[in-house]
């Protein structure tokens, strides 16, 4: 999540890994690919292709976001909860570096929850404040974390996230060459 949100069309991964992961459409709805790609990442490396990867168009009749097919608040909560589960399974404990990593992940998860709230147009179902309460009740965030976010997310935490994202992109960047013919 620090580098980018993995999507089917902009990632490369091994077929054997793809076959190990189960679809979670019933639990996550039409946004199940978010968790599917995170699950793939647990089994092996994933290559992100940055920039424009796929050209596509969306037809006016497409059901990408409507009142009958969602996405719905419960599905978004399940996505966020599973993302947190995956992180909790992989995190180390005890030292300052792991504590900082936990703060960064919480900030990323909060930012992503805000993004999904807006992108999914969840305001049709629940206000942002109401959704924050739902996330707190689900155990994703505490009231204390919300207070910290309100105080320092824009001035301190998000600039740190941007710096770390830049560092990670640079660290993992690998250019590939094109062969156009002779």
Image (cartoon, helix red, strand yellow):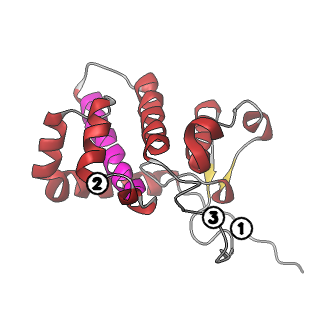
Relative to 3, is 23 above or below?
A: above
Residue plotted at (31% across, 20% down): 93
Residue picked out by circle 2: 127
Q: Nearer the viewer, residue 34 or 11?
A: 34
Residue sitting farthest toward the right: 182
Q: Position of residue 143 (x, y in %)?
A: 16, 35
- In what element is the residue under mark 1? loop
Q: Position of residue 127 (x, y in %)?
A: 28, 54
Q: CA distance from mark 3 to mark 2?
A: 22 Å
Q: Nearer the viewer, residue 160 or 144?
A: 144
Can the viewer see residue 108?
A: yes
Q: Position of residue 68 (x, y in %)?
A: 57, 55
Relative to 90, is 46 above or below?
A: below
Decide if residue 148 is on the left or right side of residue 9: left
Relative to 182, is 79 above or below?
A: above
Residue picked out by circle 3: 63
Can the viewer see residue 107?
A: no
- In what element is the residue under mark 3? loop
Question: Magenta segment, principal secondary structure?
Answer: helix
Residue sitting farthest toward the front: 68
Decide if residue 69 is on the left or right side of residue 57: left
Is the residue under label 1 in contact with that under label 3 (CB below 8 Å)? no
Which range is magenta? Answer: 97-117
- In what element is the residue under mark 2? loop
Residue picked out by circle 1: 177
Residue plotted at (13% across, 43% down): 148
Q: Nearer the viewer, residue 105 or 148?
A: 148
Q: Is residue 110 magenta?
A: yes
Residue 180, located in which quarter of the rendered image?
Answer: bottom right
Q: CA distance from mark 1 to mark 2?
A: 48 Å
């Amino acid at each position: 999540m620090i580098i980018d949100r993995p999507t089917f069309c902009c990632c490369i991964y091994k077929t054997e890994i793809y076959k190990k992961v189960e679809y979670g459409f019933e639990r996550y709805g039409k946004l199940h690919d978010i968790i599917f790609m995170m699950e793939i990442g647990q089994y092996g490396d994933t290559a992100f292709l940055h920039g424009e990867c796929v050209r596509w168009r969306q037809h006016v009749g497409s059901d990408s976001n409507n009142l009958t097919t969602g996405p719905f608040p419960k599905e978004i909560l399940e996505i966020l909860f599973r993302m947190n589960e995956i992180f909790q399974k992989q995190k180390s404990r005890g030292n300052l570096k792991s504590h900082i990593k936990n703060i960064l992940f919480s900030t990323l998860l909060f930012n992503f929850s805000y993004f999904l709230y807006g992108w999914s147009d969840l305001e049709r179902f629940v206000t942002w404040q109401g959704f924050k309460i739902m996330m707190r009740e689900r155990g994703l965030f505490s009231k204390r974390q919300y207070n910290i976010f309100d105080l320092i997310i824009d001035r301190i935490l998000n600039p740190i996230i941007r710096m770390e994202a830049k560092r990670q992109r640079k660290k993992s960047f690998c250019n590939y060459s094109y062969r156009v013919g002779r």
